[in-house]
Image (tube, helix red, strand yellow):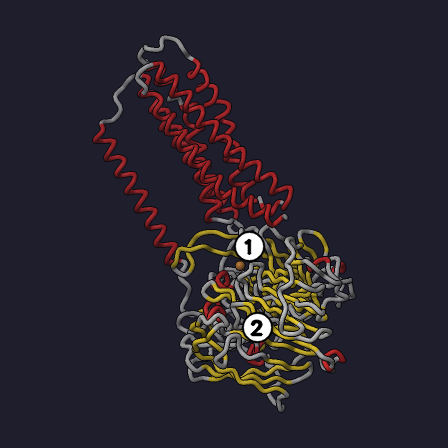
Amino acid sequence: MDVYLFSAISGLILLIVPIMFLMWGLAANRIGRLPFRSTREKLRKSAGRSLVFVWLALLTGLSFAGLAAVTLVRFGWVFVQEWAVFILPAVLLTHLAVIFFTVPALWRRSRDRQDPTGAVGGEERGAVAAPRVAVPVQAAFVAAGLSTCQISFFPVLTRFPVRLILFWASFLGLGAWLWFRQRRRERLLRREAKSPSPGFRLMRLVAVTAGVAVAGGGLFVLSMQASKLPDRLSMMNHAKVDYGGGPAVGHGDIEDSRQDHDRSGKEAVSVTELTGPRTGEPDRRYTLVARKETVRLSSGKTIEAWTFNGQVPGPELRAREGELVEVTLINEDIEDGVTIHWHGVDVPNREDGAAGLTQNAVRPGERYTYRFRVEETGTHWYHSHQTSSIQVRKGLYGPLVLLPEVEQEKEQEQALDLSLIYQSFEDRAVLNDSDTLRRRRIAPGTEVRLRLTNADNFPRSFTLAGTPFRVAAIDGNEIHRPGDLENVLLSVAAGGRYDVTFTMPEQPVKLTAGTGPDDPSILFTPGGKGEAPEAPDRLALFDPAAYGKPQRIPFDPSEGFDREFTMVFDGGMGFYNGVFRDLWLINGEKFPDTPTFLVQEGDLVKTTFINRSSMDHPMHLHGHHMLVLSRNGKPVTGSPWWTDTLNVAPGETYEVAFRADNPGIWMDHCHNLDHAAAGMTLHLSYEGVTTPFHVGEATGNHPE
Ligand SMILES: [Cu+2]
C-alpha cells in the first residue's frame, strides 16, 4: 500500500514540478507583455487572463507543498529533506510574494472599467511593469526551474553545504538581476522612452544565447569527461571510507596492496590467502564449461545463449553439509571472460568469484578452480560475476542446492525436490528452459519441495493453485514453523529464493511464474491428466515479516551494534563513464565514489536501507547472511527472516543486521544488475584485508 502511495507521489512530483515551471513561465510571459496593450480595455482583459495563469501556477505550487507534507507524515524526514531546504522555501517565498503583490495589482487592473477605449498612458504602462508586480512571478519561474533541475539531477546527500549555497546563490542572484532589469524597464516605460532598437535587441539575444550555449556545452563536456572511469582501479582505492561510527581501523594501503602491514600495524592479509581448503580429496567434483550455444525453449523458440555445459540454466549442483566441493570452470568461448559467484553461500573470500576483486576474469581457453567446504544448507544459485548484467541475462547461471548433512527421513520416502529458476530472455518469461505450460506426473501423497529462484533483474511473482502450501525457506534459510498458505502471491526478489513445500493432493496443482495465463507454468497431476485448478481472483501478497514463529537468534539487537551504516537510494539523470543516462545512487553517489564500509572481524553490524527512488533495489551482500530487524519502522514479528538479497521497494526503509564473521572484501550491490552496472555498488571491507586485483578497461575485469 505504502509502496503504491510512494510511487504515486514520486511520479506526481516529477510531473508537477516541471508543470509548475511551465505555468510560471507562461504567467511571466503574459505579464511581461501587459505594458504593450494598446487600449485600456485590452489591458484590462489581458490582466484578467494573466491572473488565471497566476492562479493555475499557484495551484501547482500548492499541490507540490501538499505532496511534500504527505510524504513527510507517511515516510519521514529523510524522504523530504532536500525538498525542505531547497525547493520548498524558494517556492513558498515566491508564491507568497505573488499572492501579496502580483495578485492584488492584476486584480485591480482587471476590474478597471474606466474609459475602455482610451489609450494606455506611460504611467499605467510603468505601473503594470513595476518590479513588485512582475518580479515575484519571474522569481517563481526561476525557483520552479531550479527545483526541476534539483529533482531530476541532484539528490544532495553529499557536498550538502556547497550545493545548498549554490542553489540559494543562483536563486537570489537571478532574483536580484530580474529586479534591476524590471526596474529599468519600468522607468523606460514611464518616460515613454524608446526601448533599444530591434537590431540591438537581436544582437543582445544572440550574444546571451551563445554565451549560455557555450557555458552549457562546456559544462556538459567537462561532466562527461569527469565521469569516465579510470582504466585501472583497485577496489580498495576508495575516496570515502565509512567506519559506521566504530573505530577507524586500517585497511589495505591504497597505492601498494602488497605491503605487509596496513596503517594500524596489523598484519595485512590478501584476499588470495582467504581460500577454501586447498588440499584434500573433494567429496563433490564438478566441471562447468562456459560456452555459447543455441538453446531451444519448450515453445520451440530458440535463444542464442551463453551457457554452462551447453544448457540453460546450467547443471544443478548438489552437495551436503560438511562436504568439500571442487568446481572447475573452463571458459571455451566467452570473449569477455567469466567467473562463478556462489550467490547466497558464505564461501571464503577468494572463492567468491567477483572479477577484479577476488580473482581475474577467466579468459577463453583458461580454467579456474573453486574449492569450498559446505557449511550451510539451502537453495542457492551460481552465476558469472564478470559483466554480470550481460552474462546472467544471457544464461550463465544455474541452481546450487546444499542439503543437510544427514539424510532426513522424508528424503527416503517418495519425494520431489525441484529447482526452478526464472529468467527473462528478450522479454520472454522462462522457467528453467520452459516458456510454456508443462505437465508433470506425480503420485498423491508425494512430498514436494519447489526451489524457486529469480535470476531476473526485477521481483518476480509466483502463484501456486490447487493446494495449501508453505514457504519453507527464504534465500536458503529455513523458516521457523511456517504456517499453511493459500491464495497468496509470492514475490521473490531479483536474486532471491523461496522454497515452497506441499503434499501432493488427489487433484492437480499448478505453479506459475507470474500471474498471467501465458506465463510459464507447471501442472502437477496425479495421473498425468487433469485440468489446471481455478486460480483465485484475489491474491494477498505474502509477507515474510509476519510469517512463521519467532525463534532465538544468535545475537541480541537490543544490546546495540559495533557499527551502523546507512544506504539511501536515489534515482537521477547524469553521466556515468561518459554516457548520459539514468543513474541509481547510493548516498548520492555511484561507484567508485560510493563509500566503503570498514569493519573488524566479530563486529555486529547494522545497515539501514532507505529507498527514495521510484524503482525496486534488491540489495545483495556477498559472504554474509543479513537478519531483517524491521521494515518501515515495524519490527519483524514472525520467524527470523534471514536474507542475502533483500528487495527494498520504493518508499521502504529496512534495518538489517549481520555478524562480520567472514573476513575479506565483499561486494554489496543492487541485484538489478543493470543498476549495479551503472555504479549501484559498494564494498564491505575488513580491517587489514587487501586485494592485488583491479577493475577497469585495462584489466579486463568488470564485475558488474
Ligand atoms: Cu537497483
Q: Position of residue 561 (x, y in %)?
A: 70, 61
**Of all residues shown, which one is farthest toward the left?**
199
Secondary element at tag 2: loop
Q: Residues within 10 Å of mark 1 (few under 14, many from 20)?
A: many
Whether residue 151 sits left or right of residue 323 in the image: it is left
Q: Residue at x 49, y 67 (%)?
A: 237
- Choose between 183 and 528: the one closer to the eye: 528
- Choose between 704 and 285: the one closer to the eye: 285
Q: Position of residue 378 (x, y in %)?
A: 66, 74
- Res. 434 in view: yes
Beta carbon at label 1 within 8 Å of ligand 1: yes
Q: Which residue is mark 2?
A: 262
- Res. 702 in view: no
Q: Position of residue 77 (x, y in %)?
A: 62, 45
Q: Is 117 situated above or below 673?
A: above
**Amino acid type at mark 1:** Phe
Front label number (2 vs 1): 1
**Of all residues shown, which one is farthest toward the bottom?**
281
